[in-house]
Amino acid sequence: MASIFTKIILGEIPSYKIYEDEKYYAFLDINPNALGHTLCIPKKEVDKLFDLDDETYKGLMIFSKKIAEALKKAVDCQRIGVSVIGLEVPHVHVHLIPINKMDDMSFNSKIKLSDDEFVDIMKKIKSYL
Ligand code: AMP
């Protein structure tokens, strides 16, 4: 069965899409740690990061860098933290999280955003791509 992220790529489930190319897709995390929390995924559905073939792995990192640079410009933060977990969704995803302190990388503290707030930050990040 297709992962929830494959369904997002196919447009079967909505997402706040930041950017996509032929092989990768970036969208806002629906339950963010911080404003602008973004997920970058390969369109190829693979569960674990280190099971990716080298080309897809490198491509995902370069794609994530491009999105992180735009995210850093869009959100007032010290830096963009990177995390790969995958315990909830078995489809490789790189978390890009605007951070100011170590706790901002904790997945225990979440923020709530309205639809308008998701749309606003999505547009802002896109404007820097
Ligand atoms: P993990 O697999 O533990 O790295 O976490 C999966 C992440 O995907 C969590 O941060 C969820 O909030 C996020 N997530 C799950 N479903 C969706 C969705 N439909 N749209 C955006 N983000 C999602």
Image (cartoon, grey):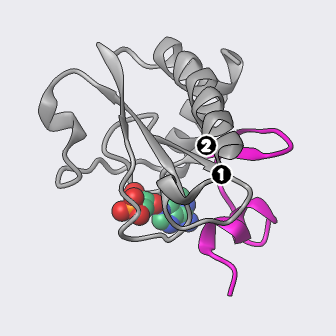
Residue 110, magenta (yes or no): no
Residue 27: percent from left, percent from top = 61, 46
Q: Which residue is disc 2 drawn over?
A: 57
Residue 47: percent from left, percent from top = 53, 67
Residue 86: percent from left, percent from top = 41, 62
Which of the 4 image quadrants contains residue 116? top right
Q: Nearer the viewer, mark 1 or mark 2?
A: 1
Instruction: Identify the residue at image location x=55%, y=16%.
Output: 69
Give the vertical position of 24 relative to 77 (above or below). below
The quarter of the picture where the N terminus appears is bottom right
* Residue nearest the viewer, comparing 111 with 72: 72
Disc 1 to disc 2: CB gap under 8 Å: yes
Q: Residue furthest right?
A: 22
Left or right position of 121 against 10: left
Q: How far, Cα to Cα, is label 1 from label 2?
A: 6 Å
Instruction: Identify the residue at image location x=43%, y=19%.
Output: 75
Q: Which residue is disc 1 drawn over?
A: 53
Can residue 48 be seen here? The reply is yes
Give the vertical position of 67 relative to 96 (above or below). above
Instruction: Identify the residue at image location x=39%, y=71%.
Output: 88
Mark drawn on residue 5: none
The quarter of the picture where the C terminus appears is top right
Query: Which residues, given as a range, are shown in magenta?
Result: 1-26
* Residue nearest the viewer, comparing 59 with 73: 59
* Residue nearest the viewer, comparing 34 with 90: 90
